Amino acid sequence: MIVVSDTTPLIGLASIGRFELLRELFREIYIPQAVYDEAVVFGREKGGAEREVARAKWVKVKEVKDRLAVEVLLDELDLGEAETIVLAREINADWVLMDEKKGRRKLEQLGLQKIGTIGILLKAKEMGYVEMLRPELKRLREKGFSISQHVIDAVLERANEK
């Protein structure tokens, strides 16, 4: 399975001590240079993601080739999101890890499968890597992740924690 990640899922899972779930679920993840830079170079205060990403041998940094496609997407998205989407297309990714609404809409338009931080946690619970979602979602919120109560309720219901 080929998986490409944007920055936010890396930061989110690292901030709650669940970065290893990515390896458990996906074995290896590709990230474009812009995501590496956001998480490691510029992300020194982002909840531990800089350490996790920098030392994880299963996180592979891959250079995006189609710079023109990235430039076009920059009208709507930030550099990390744009490079993530272009890289996903270039390497025929099966999944793209992304939370931002605009980026997720673009993935949908392009027919690329997406999953965000909360979806990753739900998948991890379904596969037995996480016992309860409620405390994980609470910690994400405490770390500054914007999650509506409606989304939390829906996820907890799907996880049989309602």
Image (spheres, rainbow, N blue to C red):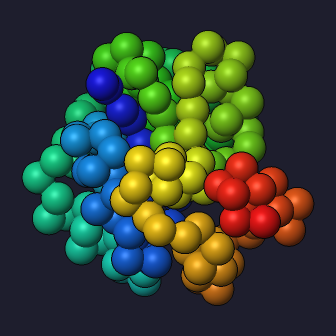
In this orientation, which residue lies closer to the viewer: 116 or 71? Answer: 116
Q: Horizontal placement of 17 versus 105: left or right? A: left
Number of dots carrying numbers: 0
**126 and 62: which is toward the camera:** 126
User: In this view, which residue lies farthest toward the right?
Assistant: 150
Vertical relation: 22 (above or below) 66: below
Residue 65: image location, x then y, percent: 31, 20
Residue 153 located left or right of residue 29: right
Residue 18 place in picture, x, y as percent:
38, 69
Tell me where residue 76 appears, x and y as whole percent. Answer: 71, 35
Taking the spot 69% from the left edge, 57% from the top edge, the residue there is 160
Whether residue 112 is visible here, answered yes or no, is yes
Nearer to the camera, 86 or 117: 117
Q: In this rendering, does residue 43 appear at all? A: no
Q: Position of residue 78 (x, y in %)?
A: 59, 46
Residue at image position (11%, 52%) is: 57
Q: Quadrant of the N terminus?
A: top left
Quadrant that contains the C terminus: bottom right
Looking at the picture, tell me which residue is in the foreground, 106 or 94.
94
- Residue 104, above or below 37: above
| Residue name at image x 65 percent, y 37 percent | 103
Q: Residue at x 25, y 68 (%)?
A: 52
